Image (cartoon, rainbow, N blue to C red):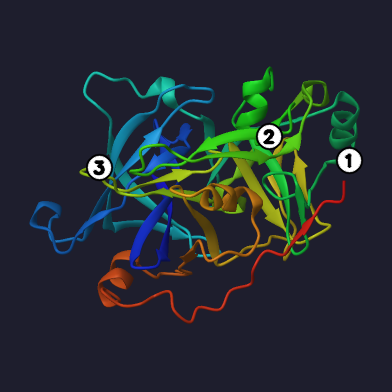
Amino acid sequence: MIKIRLCHARGRSYFIPEVLIGFGGSKFFLPSFFGPPQLSFGSPLARGYHEATFSVDVAAPRARNAVRVMVTIRSDGHLRSFAGGAQLYRCEYAGPQNVPLAPEVGGSCTQLADGDFALDLFHHTRSTNAKSIMNSGELWSSSCNLAGTGELENVACVYFTTLPSIRDENDLRRVAMSSFGSISYQTTSDRRVEGTLELPVYKGELAARDTTLSFAVPTALIAPPHLLCHPAIAHNPAYYEVVGPEIVRVAVTPGNKLLFIDGGVTAEAGQLKSFDYVIEGDASSAAGLEAPMKEEATTQVSHLERLDGDADIFAFWKANANTDLVTGRQVEWRKLREKVA
């Protein structure tokens, strides 16, 4: 099964694959890269149903290389819709021949009574904070943006990760921190010399994350990730990158928190916060590399389609083919306030 969202950027629509569930519903993958879908309507190979196929790169926490799997969903495989428009579909997926996928899972998961899946994730903090969290049964949210250099006025997030521990500088960078206070990026383009970006991020310390807490987080609570779009170069097609694939965020209204009982995370009614867009930074420019991490209002966005209830991705795509689904959209922007040093 796979949780996906339909989204629209200028001149194109595509799916954001958020979570791929495999191994009989016991393991999950979090995509790191993915490609645009290829759709077939009324395919005789799919018994007349509509079909979409797209690539998803998956990797275990800390993996240096990802494995590309091809995912196929069909119009008769719709299982449920989530608030905010995400969809859960049955799917088929396959990796390269003779390449095992078990080493690439992001972690374990459990199917819930409502058909959703709870992902086993981690929260790292100081031992003193961990005691307070466990005694209170609450996880407090942070108003920091993804880079940790500004404060968001209209949303706060509770942070989780697939990393079972934070053990070195590389792990800090995987969760958008650095003991040096910055992370280096490089553009993707056809220029002879690529541009670079030294991005200020939260100056984190390993000692502040010496205790690990485990939680089961339903995918219905998880906010969609921001993206980078890597442009087509020569004969190489464009592709998308998930920003911080080892980071999982639950967005709530400012000042609110998540609750947990026996590790199972819940949110009180009306406390989740959602936006109708994700930031889609242009990886060919320094400004584009910065945009998803900074999270301020930008034109570099992809608009999320709210397909609720029994709405069908394939029917919507077919009915709105070759139409402008971006112009005129009204969205609530994230409001960023720079931190005062």
Tally the numbered discs: 3
- Label 3, residues with CA under 10 Å away: few <14, some 14-19, many ≥20: few
Residue 129: percent from the left, percent from the top?
A: 88, 32
- Label 2, residues with CA under 10 Å away: few <14, some 14-19, many ≥20: some
Mark 3 highlights which residue? 236
Mark 1 highlights which residue? 136
Residue at (45%, 68%) from the top-left corner?
Answer: 305
In terms of sequence position, does the residue under pointer 1 or pointer 3 come before the other?
1
Dot 3 amino acid type: Asn
Residue 164 visible from this viewpoint? no
SS state under label 3: loop
Q: Quadrant of the N terminus?
A: top left
Distance CA(mark 3)–CA(mark 2): 30 Å
Residue at (30%, 76%) from the top-left corner?
Answer: 320
Residue 113: percent from the left, percent from the top?
A: 55, 48
Mark 2 highlights which residue? 182
Question: Quarter of the image holding residue 296?
Answer: bottom right
Q: Is residue 155 above or below residue 290?
A: below
> Which residue is the extreme one toward the front?
192
Q: Is residue 57 above or below residue 293?
A: above
The reply to whether the C-beta atoms of the residues labelled 1 and 3 are less than 8 Å apart is no
Toward the viewer: 240 or 114? 240
Identify the disc placed on residue 326. none
The mark closer to the camera, 1 or 3, is: 3
Dot 2 amino acid type: Ser
